[in-house]
Amino acid sequence: MKVLYCHPLHGAKARDAVAFVDVELNDHVRLYALRLVRQPDGAYRLYAPQAGTRRTATFSDPMAERLTALAVEAYEAANDR
């Protein structure tokens, strides 16, 4: 599992997307335009994109935590450039 691309968004406020992230889950599955969202308490969470009002994918809590950790790492690295 790895981040392919992280596009930070500038000027984000609490509960805003701070970046869009593309990830490769394995050799067979890639997900694009996942939203890294900063929660009001400062924690981050990664969400799948939506098609209208419906999410295109959901993740178990352990998978969401792992993906979020990878996305935050990529986000922080992108901001350090």
Image: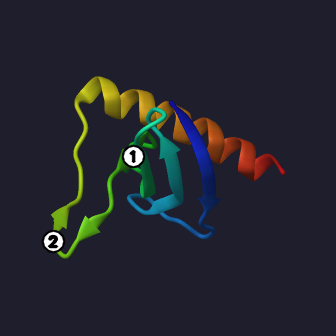
Secondary-structure class at tag 2: loop
Observer-nearest residue: 10 or 50?
Answer: 50
Q: Count residues near mark 1 (Cα–Cα under 10 Å), then give few for <14, some for 14-19, many for 20+.
A: many
The residue furthest bottom is 52
Q: Are marks 1 and 2 in contact (CB under 8 Å)?
A: no
Look at mark 2 in the image and give the residue it sits on.
53
* Residue depicted at 48% across the width and 34% down the height: 27
Q: Which mark is residue 46?
A: 1
Q: Is 68 located above or below residue 47 in the figure? A: above
Q: Count residues near mark 2 (Cα–Cα under 10 Å), then give few for <14, some for 14-19, many for 20+.
A: few
In the rendered structure, which amino acid carries the disc numbered 2? Answer: Thr
Where's residue 31, x and y in %?
Answer: 42, 51
Q: Which mark is residue 65?
A: none
Horizontal side of 15 relative to 12 (left or right) equals left
Res 9 quadrant in image:
bottom right
Where's residue 33, x and y in %?
Answer: 45, 61
Q: Is 25 located above or below residue 75 in the figure? A: above
| Residue 37 visible within the image | no
Horizontal side of 48 relative to 43 (left or right) equals left
Observer-nearest residue: 51 or 73?
Answer: 51
* Protein image colouring: rainbow
Secondary-structure class at tag 1: strand
Q: Earlier in the sequence, mark 1 or mark 2?
A: 1
In the rendered structure, which amino acid carries the disc numbered 1? Answer: Leu
* Residue depicted at 50% across the width and 31% down the height: 69
Cα distance between the residues tagged 1 and 2: 17 Å
